[in-house]
Image (tube, rainbow, N blue to C red):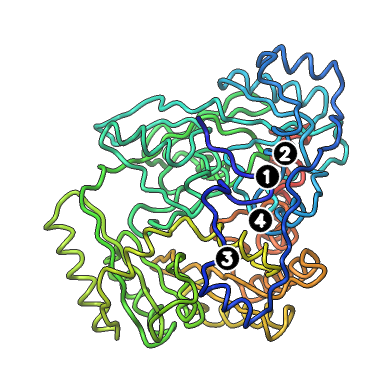
Amino acid sequence: MTREMHPARWGDPKLAGALPDSTRELVEYAFGVQDRPAVEVVAVPPSALSEEILAELRGIVGVEQVLLDDETRRLRTRGKSTPDLLRARSGDLADAPDAVVRPADHQQVLALIELAQRHRFALVPFGGGTSVTGGLVARRDDVVGVVSLDLIRMKALREVDPISMTAVLEPGLRGPEAEALLAEHQMTLGHYPQSFEYASIGGFAATRSSGQSSAGYGRFDALVVGLEVATAKGTLVLGSSPANAAGPDLRQLMLGSEGAFGVITAVRVRVRALPTVKQYEAWQFPSFADGADAMRLLAQNGQLPTVIRLSDENETALNLASHSNVGGDTVTGCLMVIGFEGTDVEAVAAKRGAVAALLTRAGGEELGAERGEAWVQGRFAAPYLRDALLDAGVLVETLETATFWSKRDEVYQAVRDALVAELGEKALVLCHISHVYETGCSLYFTVAAPGGDEPLTTWLAAKAAATEAMVGHGATVSHHHAVGSDHRPWFAREIGPVGVDILRAVKAELDPAGVLNPGVMIP
């Protein structure tokens, strides 16, 4: 049975706990505590869909697969960004879909798209609901209603090719479900974003997700070798070979399209042998710059481990890499966590030795396995901490970008300065690098500040200032969270007017009625 997330919180509230004593003491010292419990049960607006549309929906997927009840519609309302949660916690569910529809296969998805084109209702693909950039909030202008296209029934492992080491997965599979099916064949996808427990295969593809093990396994878009997509013009099947020179790669057009061009109904992915050896450890560097330089050298020398994560001085001081002990004992300087996975003990040992030698030459000091293992144990827990902090009246959110190595410090300082200027000197701005390339890296910021009386307004202003700093200094609006509706104004600047015209032309061709996730991604 698929695990559902609470409509106003992350994940399963049974797994959430109160703030640890060390964290609560830190919060009281830095911000004070102003308890703000969430509103637990809220009615959603009545469905705007006509009986004619509902009857046709039922004719395609069956009566039981068209859901209008408040509980289901609440669970398919928005994503899990802090603005999404603040709205839900205050009782605002105005963006609830008018119906939740659950197709069984590709043909039903095609039929639903045709129906949406004909009746002009918005169709919003839903995988796991983990979007943090407004990717599930359809614009209601010029549509008669909004339907959540819940892919929860499309969760088959369609095909395994043990010779080519590929597998075909359906979009509704959540991360753990996909890994469990592949493990039966001694395979792994190796894609572990922080949202892993709830995010879906379709969502990974539609947002160009990047997981915590990207250094070893690659970003999700690098794992995709083929796609099946349902569009208003029919079926698009891509990926006849591992690589080709047959014109522009249309797979890359669909990856990251966030449901605006069509609905991804199957993904052929590259898989690896299930690792039997896993070893994690921690290192310490004098400064964030020193640690970042060491990461660059690893990437440019082809010696990256499976996992690599570097906390800046502030994140290290708060011990954020150990989510069960935030605010507890930490190390000086900057903490780096690295992990090695493989099927051969000697090969893993050799890689560890080579990495250790380079990190030592770069000024790193090995700290052993304890802190590395602590990070592994809590790697998916940070969103639960956010809920506890929101309950205490603290405004907490994350944002991320990527840039070239030569601009890393410039972008890092610009975003930090923009956030502090908007949120005040009490704001805590933390950062880590967890995705690295030969040419550059990601920068992932965590922000905490007093919530005040208008936390939503406060954060939207801070996010706008930070994103302006990113784009103004030549960085991207998103490394792995996607564009959604939140980043659209800055995305237009990033790709320029010609890029905007190209996307709009594709949208007009593949979605002539403009009903596929309207208001998302396309500037």
Label 3–label 2 contact, CB within 8 A: no
Q: Are marks 2 and 1 in contact (CB under 8 Å)?
A: yes
**Residue 171 horizontal side relative to residue 332, left or right:** right
Look at mark 4 in the image and give the residue it sits on.
81
- In the figure, is residue 441 to the left or right of 75? left
Judged by depth in the image, the label closer to the viewer, 4 or 1, is 1
Nearest the camera: 354 or 315?
Answer: 315
What's the amino acid at mark 2?
Arg
Of the numbered discs 1 and 3, the one sitting upstream in the chain is 1
Nearest to the observer: residue 501 or residue 247: 501
Callout 4 amino acid: Ser
Which-is-in-front pick, marks 3 and 2? 2
Residue drawn at 71 percent across, 21 percent down: 66
- Residue holding disc 3: 400
Query: Can residue 248 be seen in the rendering of this structure?
Result: no
**On screen, 275 above or below 48?**
below
Residue 94: horizontal and vertical position, in percent?
Answer: 83, 44
Does residue 240 lie above or below 345 as drawn? Answer: above
The residue pinned by badge 1 equals 7
Q: Which mark is residue 298?
A: none
Disc 4 versus disc 2: nearer the observer: 2
Q: Quadrant of residue 120?
A: top right
Structural crowding at the residue carrying mark 2, measured as other residues with C-alpha within 10 Å and reported as few (<14), some (14–19) or many (≥20): many
